[in-house]
Image: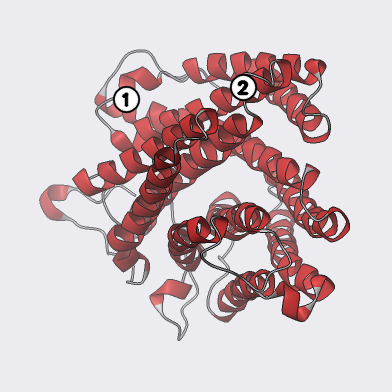
Amino acid sequence: MAVPRTRQGNYPAVLSYGFRPFFLAGAAYAALAILFWLPLLYGYAETESLFLPVDWHIHEMLFGYLAAIITGFLLTAIPNWTGRLPVQGLPLFLLFLLWLAGRFAILFSAKIGWLPALVVDSAFLAAVAAAAATEIVAGRNWRNLKVLLPLAVLLAANVLFHVEVRIAGISEISRRLAIAAAIMLIMIIGGRIIPSFTRNWLVRENPGRLPQPFDRIDVAVIVLSGLALAAWTVLPWRPETGGLLIAAGIANAARLARWAGYRTLRDPLVLVLHAAFLFVPLGFLLAGAAALAPDRVPSVAGVHAFGVGAVGTMTLAVMARATLGHTGRDLAADRATCAMFTAVILSALLRVAAAFLPDSPGLLYGSALLWSAAFGAYVVIFGPMLVSPRLQPRAASGGVRRS
């Protein structure tokens, strides 16, 4: 959570670091888009989009919300990795405007045409990838170049999404490809930060068993998971794909068990990271079961375990922790923050349950409301921190803020 020096400038605090505008806008968009999605789904609302309601929903969660949070994370993490100055001020504002333009391009794609919508929407992720690559290479931080691969896959999935909708009228491969990219990012980055934050807390607060360090087992699990996700993207119904997915689910559960999460019950900020990663093996297992027994397990169960569970919970957990640390506050979750984490986890569980019980719309409504409540809570709790200058270190009793 070290914060490198920043360039002084005549701009508001919200433009001083990448996480500030993108976490704030991304969370607000996640909350509002889901509230709009249900009326859209049931025909009570309309858009000027070329996308069907289900595709609008999928696209905006993956390439609207998720892309914003990934950008905020990378623009904050890369300066820590490289020691270089962060993107801030006018360049950051222009990047944010490019993200915002993509949202309007999708919403009004029927008016502006599919090709202009594709170009405007895809320009954001292309700009983020270029900025990330430039900083990593300039800082000679070669080991972190691997995070660019899932980002490039996400960009390719976005382009393919537009093409699929144009040709077939609905997305198929592209939506699974985007989810696969997101899960790979969670396995790569989450596999670094979860054991690291767990180790730091345990050494200080609960001496004893520590997480296992990154080794060949982690590499093998990531490779196996990548193969399973690749097969799922292209051939999700094949029994061979189901076998790979089940194996990846078991392997990721074993990997998570190596990180001693059960010993972090007293620190919600660490515990929620383990809870979020638990949805990764659950998603693999459900997707595998859907391939092997499609008459018993709906395919959307695994999709939403990945999307609402792993992606939603992990991003919200990382956003909360990063906001506290990078704004100079103590790394501690109050009751409101714990309620926010509980809401997003319950939202994921209800959404998976709704996949098995499609005739129970209350589960879908409950999941949507809990999701919006969780991300709305982030805006209310953490929004003031994001638009205010970083707090200065506190020297009371010889201590300082842990950030």
Q: Position of residue 165 (x, y in %)?
A: 80, 57
Dot 2 or dot 1: first in sequence order is: 1
* Foreground pick, 395 / 284: 284
From this viewpoint, is residue 331 visible?
no
Badge 2: few (under 14), some or many (20 or more) residues near its Cα, within 10 Å? some
Q: Is residue 337 visible?
A: yes
CA distance separating discs 2 and 1: 33 Å
Q: Which residue is mark 2?
A: 297
Q: Residue sitting at 18 percent across and 56 percent down?
A: 395
Which residue sits at x=61%, y=58%? 60
Quarter of the image where one finds residue 306: top right
Badge 2 amino acid: Val
Q: Amino acid at mark 1?
A: Thr
Q: Residue furthest right?
A: 167
Question: Label 1 crowding class (10 Å Cα cut-off): few <14, some 14-19, many 20+?
Answer: some
Q: Looking at the image, which residue sits at the far bottom?
A: 10
The location of residue 288, given as percent across then percent down, is 68, 20
Residue 264 disc label: 1
Q: Could you say where residue 81 lies in the image, as x and y percent from the top left?
A: 58, 49
In the figure, is residue 97 to the left or right of 2?
A: right
- Nearer to the camera, 313 or 235: 235
